[in-house]
Image: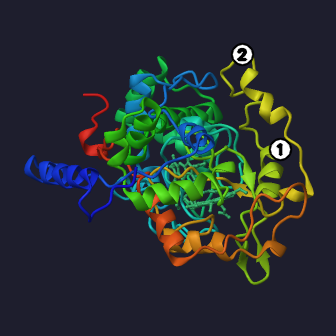
Amino acid sequence: MTPRRSGGSIAAQLWRFSILFCMLSGIAAPAPALDFTAEERRRILRHGPWPPILQPDPSNRVSAKPAAIAFGHALFFEPRLSISGAVSCATCHRPDRAFTDGLPRSRGHRTGDRNAPSLFNLRFNRWFGWDGAQDSLWAQNLRPLLDRREMGVGSGGAARLVRSDRELSCGYRRAFGEASGADDERVFVDLGKALAAFLETQVTGRTPFDDFRDALAQGDAAGRARYPAAAARGLRLFVGRGNCAFCHFGPAFTNGEFADAGVPHFIEPDRVDPGRHGGIRKLRRSPHTLLGRFNDDAERSTAAKTRHVRLRQSNFGEFRVPGLRNAALTAPYMHAGSLATLADVARHYSTLDEERLHAGGERILRRLDLSAREVADLVAFLATLTEKKPLHEFVEKSENVLCR
Ligand code: HEC
Ligand code: HEC
């Protein structure tokens, strides 16, 4: 029912009375809630519940182990894991910036080609990196240690540091239940696993959207009415005409796969980022995949997706669909940080050049021609995916004593 604000009907008087009542009792008058169709409700409910239940990672024998989480936490803030002694994971993944650096393309020893993604909700990913060049979180954590533009300490350098430093070697022993052995490569991979144990714990907290979604599921009209009207209109676009939820699917707002979202992928005028195409090629060359000797899952069931991956021409220019929880905190956007704000992202989908997209298969993305109000509505919706209270703690290394 849409209440009328003028006129003398009983309904209108009751409405005025309820507004007065709400004001007197200190509660804001609820705006009339947008009605969703049964199909829209079904689509909205798929984006929850939140938070999900975390399962340990079978490919990592120290996943969910408290001593490994503490060790990984210390490693995350450790600049001695870089050749200069000046760059740590937290240089580009700053806890006070939702684990990003705020730059279009991140900078360690030199500026790289891509935007530093936020590090929340990683346990739910199948692939890691914008191009999915890694098939596990622990393997992904090794990449910056090998790349000289980022940290570049290398496997030998990292293993030597752990063996020679009293606190780190103690942290290793507690996490893995034995002293770091003579196999550099194994110690190195174990650092990736401890870092993974730490990062898995970084899950985003509940958001206004989650409250709305649960109110919708429970038929709680008062809870629904608390959701801002503009966000509700943006949500309708997101699951409806915008078709955003096709790729930004499920509780984490990503289907975990790769797509061409029409973002130009030139790094320099004569150098292009091959995206998923390059990612699959790197994956095949890597000694650190789930098919190799470092996977702790004896059954190898975790390796099925890696075994079945196929290289196709259409992978060129595809990037991983990012999750959208906390997106309002992680500007700039897209794989090379080419869009500064969420409004720019909405306008990108609005004015998309369909000719640039892959023609293969059914067309998912269409130029949306959104009005200024629709752009604002989408942004209002995306803003409600921001956690109200972090589930994770931003504790710096100094407070995280490993061994005393
Ligand atoms: C110089 C900046 C820089 C440093 C230092 C750095 N990263 Fe990153 N990180 C990035 C960039 C850029 C990407 C995206 C890489 C890509 O797609 O090729 C990334 C991606 C990731 C991802 C993948 C996230 C996802 O959604 O798939 C993880 C996990 C990660 N980094 C963890 C770490 C850890 C752990 C360290 C320290 C050992 C670290 N990073 C150090 C810049 C950095
Ligand atoms: C065909 C799949 C697909 C559809 C449909 C889609 N997206 Fe995306 N989205 C992506 C991919 C892939 C990226 C990353 C592209 C890149 O970096 O080149 C992305 C990036 C984003 C980002 C930036 C996130 C970040 O951390 O950088 C936002 C925000 C976003 N999309 C919102 C939307 C909205 C809103 C819609 C609907 C209007 C939408 N998407 C529709 C695949 C899709």
Q: Which numbered disc flags the more N-terminal residue, 2 or 1?
A: 1
Q: Measuring from the top left, give residue 354's x and y in whole percent.
A: 79, 72
Q: Which residue is mark 2?
A: 298
Asked if ligand 1 lies within 8 A of label 2, the reply is no
Q: Neighbour class for label 2 at 10 Å: few (<14), some, many (≥20)?
A: few
Residue displayed at 67% across by 38% down:
126
> What is the three-letter code of the residue carrying label 1?
Arg
Determine the CA span between mark 2 and mark 1.
21 Å
Q: Measuring from the top left, give residue 245's x and y in whole percent.
A: 63, 50
Residue displayed at 84% across by 32% down:
307
Residue displayed at 26% across by 44% down:
398
Q: Quadrant of residue 135?
A: top right
| Camera sees residue 148 | yes
- 33 is higher (above) or lower (below) than 356: above
Judged from the image, the secondary structure of the residue bearing numbered disc 2 is: loop
Quadrant location, the C terminus: top left
Judged from the image, the secondary structure of the residue bearing numbered disc 1 is: helix
Q: Which residue is mark 1?
A: 284
